[in-house]
Amino acid sequence: MSKANRSPFKLDTDLLSLRTLVAVVEEGGFSAAANRVHRTQSAISLQIAKLEERLNTKLLERTSRSLSLTPAGETFLSYARRILELADESMLALSAPEEGSLLRVGFAEYLAPQHLHSVLARFRRAHPNCELRLVLGLGGEMLDALDRGELDVVFSGPDRDGGQVLWQEPLVWTGHDKFGDDDEIELLLFPAPCIYRKIAFDALTKAGRTWKVALNANSTQAIQSAVRAGMGIGILPASSVLDDMPVIEAGMPKLSNTYLVSYTAPDLSNPYASRFTDFLLACIEDSLGKSIIFLDRGKAEVSGKPGRRKTRSQEKA
């Protein structure tokens, strides 16, 4: 391919090629990426080859058993993600409601993902006419505020019937495991009536372990700090466990999954509530990838137990 009329300082490619590269890296291979972007494996391979030719550099190291980024690929991938983020924001901004509106969002603190601050910033950039207010607290408190008309949408656990399950992810034990099989475990928990507290107590009781509550924390950050300080063992969603927080598997009882559920008032008329939920799902999928299982919002209504699994890629198919 001739490069005579191409400046080496201009990116000459399409967004689909960038999405393909991101999919290949995040899915760990060409076959899984093909399923994600709904193209054949040969088409994926051809797209990556053309992208490398346009950039005049190798992005991926491929063998029959492994795939990894080259140093140039690592650099380019970060730019590709930023380009795609801005492109998606531009489309959301163009399709956003023109009228100004106040959106009051309640988020159960124990379920708030660590990337929530960036989600909020991106939503505000894409919806400049929307005044966004966020309230963090316990799930029950948020739902009571929803009933009083003080919030427009609440994200919490499956605390009552009528919500829509958005995703599920594993609960894990995290901390520096200094406790023997016969030792009393020191727990770092949210105060009652947090559902994680009950799950921890039930799991330990069934396993025949003894415990005491060493800390009643009022935020995820407080539990993270206590875990880092070696004060005991906490229970958190996998997405809330930071890189320097050990996950304990051996010697501790297995935990169930946790669910994020959206609740809205029956007479909801706020044009931004559904858009915020969709935006949240898209941003969390981009940042957390495989650690979360997304569910079918149309069928996963809370009524005693969550609905059936359905990945985001299946929703788009």
Image: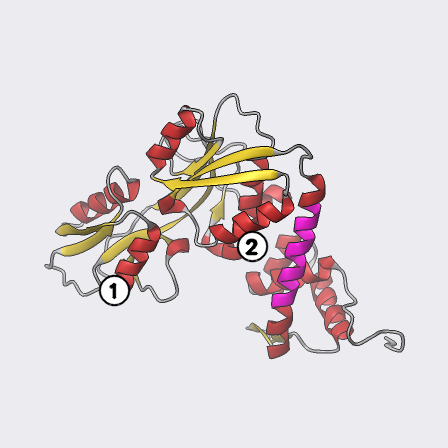
Q: CA distance from mark 2 to mark 1?
A: 30 Å
Say which amino acid is labelled 2: Asp
Q: Nearer the viewer, residue 306 or 190?
A: 190
Q: Is residue 184 left or right of residue 10?
A: left
- Seen at 44% across and 50% down, the residue is 113
From the top left corner, tell me how far across and down residue 36 is, in percent: 62, 53
> Which callout, 2 or 1, points at the residue further toward the start of the chain?
1
Q: Which residue is pictured at 86% across the width and 77% down the height?
A: 3
Residue 203 vs residue 126, the one in the foreground: 126
Q: Is disc 1 placed on a helix, strand or loop?
A: loop
Residue linked to disc 2? 286
Q: Is residue 254 above or below residue 275?
A: below
Residue 315 visible in the shown view: yes
Disc number for residue 139: none
- Is the residue 136 above or below the residue 220 in the image? above
Residue 277 locus on image (x, y percent): 54, 39
Residue reaching furthest top? 267
Q: Quadrant of residue 81?
A: bottom right
Is residue 262 rendered to the left or right of residue 172? right
Q: Residue 160: x and y, percent?
A: 37, 29
Instruction: Inspect the magenta stretch and tell me whether residue 153 lies in it.
Output: no
Element type where label 2 sits in the image: helix
For disc 1, the marked residue is 229
Applied colour scheme: secondary structure
Quarter of the figure with the N terminus: bottom right
**Residue range corresponding to the magenta coloring:** 78-91
Q: Nearer the viewer, mark 2 or mark 1?
A: 1
Q: Measuring 55% from the left and 50% from the top, which residue is drawn there?
A: 121
Crowd rating for badge 2 (residues with CA inside 10 Å; few <14, some 14–19, many 20+): some
Q: Determine if the magenta segment contains residue 82.
A: yes
